[in-house]
Image (cartoon, coloured by chain):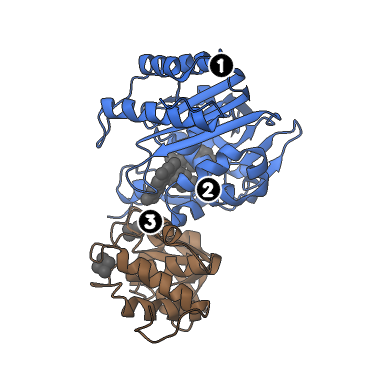
Chain colours: A brown, B blue
Amino acid sequence: MESTTDIEFEVNGKRVRLAVSPREHLADVLRQRCGLTGTHLGCEHGVCGACTVRVDGAAIRGCLILAVQADGAQVRTIEGEGNDPVMQALQQAFIERNALQCGYCTPGFLLTAAELLELDPDPSRESIREYLSGNICRCTGYQAIVDAVELAARRLRGEAGTDASVP
Amino acid sequence: MKPAPFVYVRAASVEHALEVLAEHGDDALVLAGGQSLVPMLNLRLVQPAVVLDINALHGLATIESHTAGGLRLGALVRHREIAVDPLVAACAPLLRAAAPWIAHPAVRHRGTLGGSLALGDPAAEWPACAVALDATIRLASRTGGERCVAAESFFHGLYRSDRRGDELLVGCDLAQASHDSVFSFRELARRHGDYAAVGLAVSACGRPGAWRTLRLVFFGIGDTPIRATACGEALAAGAGLAEARAQLEAELEPRADLWFSAQAKRHLAVHLLREAWRDLGHPDTGE
Ligand SMILES: Cc1cc2nc3c(=O)[nH]c(=O)nc-3n(C[C@H](O)[C@H](O)[C@H](O)COP(=O)(O)OP(=O)(O)OC[C@H]3O[C@@H](n4cnc5c(N)ncnc54)[C@H](O)[C@@H]3O)c2cc1C
Ligand code: FES
Ligand code: FES
């Protein structure tokens, strides 16, 4: 029997205690043990960004951190961000701009974009592209995603209305 | 795709880490940022008996001026901190310029300087910058205490370095920059955040045509960072771009990778030399 380690961490504001195997990465534990399947797994070696979660504030790869390393940390997944105004603006803009098709990549893009808008409320298209460069989308061709992040940023700055027809 | 089972040890102190490494040697692998190790574990390219997590060693996560006036960087300093730290920007602008080229924000949040140096990927930015800046790499072991190795002699071959299995890479020291230090960092990659197709890190003291020191280090073209010594000497002696280029073409022996032939890499290396030439303040010869 493989040995386990007890960890205690906070997931979307709730305290969670679990016994995990050291070889389980955080994304698997969130999906399989916490039932938070919004964290997706595309490649499990760091290239796609579908597994993005925020650990102690930083958007990181959920597949490249062991669950044992999250002991004592504050973890936020896409499920925990529904009431966040930045996330709400991004979600609305993603819908309006057709920035998702199959949606597999979307949680990762949203969490990464939210971090960008917290750091820089007025990013250029180039810096949006650069910030999202670690997230892969096989459907949209990225243009619509960049448009959506730009729109959300403008709205959060109070420069664009919420009417979908507003450019 | 999951790692094979291993024993996880969280180092409580540097001494504790050295103890574990002394006991297990190559059967233990250090876990720093995990941005290269965890993919290797997930793909089962490595199957260590012990994974030694050093993330709690906060003493290794600092950036400070050291007594000789230079910069002392701990092994656990993350790529992202190097990108934003004011001391780095002031004392080691080459590192500041290189940091955004490493991977993507999410990887830079976790990946560490020490991990990158210990791994020694031939297309990675930090090893080349360390050689260009003539950095000193600091290693510690239980039996040998601390020892220092010049970056230039640290990288031995493809993913092979001077580090012994029982040693922890604890940090990297940079000498104080002089008033006339200049640098250039240039890289070509297929996509932003990818490892370099070819990159060039240059650090120099003096002025165009009269360089006291000039270190040109290419990455992504060989098994280790490659110092273009003849080209650098020619430039230091006042050579023009055409002569420097001829020297470079004579001394470089690029190795093809999955995407670029040796010939393409040579072409790109010459292109980067031309850009670095301008960055260093040489006149634009229109060549
Ligand atoms: C999608 C993606 C893109 C990337 N692109 C780039 C890129 O463009 N350029 C680039 O340079 N890197 C790139 N990387 C790699 C990244 O920079 C890693 O952070 C870095 O290579 C290793 O640092 P780490 O702290 O993550 O080390 P880890 O992954 O924890 O360890 C790497 C190796 O070094 C050993 N090690 C780590 N720390 C020490 C220490 N203090 N003492 C002794 N041994 C140690 C480990 O045992 C392991 O063998 C990329 C990674 C990903 C996932
Ligand atoms: S699943 Fe983590 S980066 Fe692809
Ligand atoms: S919407 Fe399908 S992968 Fe991005």
For disc 1, the marked residue is: B236
Label annotation for residue A133: 3
Determine whether the beta carbon of the residue marked 2 sits less than 8 angstroms from the nearest atom of ligand 1.
yes
| Residue drawn at point x = 60 percent, y = 33 percent | B140
Q: Chain under label 2?
A: B
Q: Position of residue A127 (x, y in %)?
A: 45, 58
Quarter the N terminus of chain B occupies: bottom left
Residue B213 sits above or below residue B79 on the image? above
Q: Position of B267 compared to B279: left or right?
A: left
- Name the residue at the front extreme: B286
Evaluate if marks 1 and 3 touch, with contact meaning CB atoms under 8 Å apart. Answer: no
Evaluate if marks 1 and 2 touch, with contact meaning CB atoms under 8 Å apart. Answer: no
Q: Position of A24 compared to B149: left or right?
A: left
Q: Position of residue B5 (x, y in %)?
A: 35, 52
Q: Quadrant of residue B175?
A: top right
- Secondary structure type for disc 3: loop
- Secondary structure type for disc 1: helix
Q: Position of residue A152 (x, y in %)?
A: 44, 75
- Name the residue at the bottom extreme: A163
Q: Are marks 1 and 3 on the same chain?
A: no
Label annotation for residue B79: 2
Q: Nearer the viewer, residue B252 or B234?
A: B234
Q: Give the crowd class for mark 2: few <14, some 14-19, many >=20 residues within 10 Å.
A: many
Quarter the C terminus of chain B occupies: top left
* Tag 1: amino acid: Ala
Q: Give the crowd class for mark 3: few <14, some 14-19, many >=20 residues within 10 Å.
A: many
* Tag 2: amino acid: His
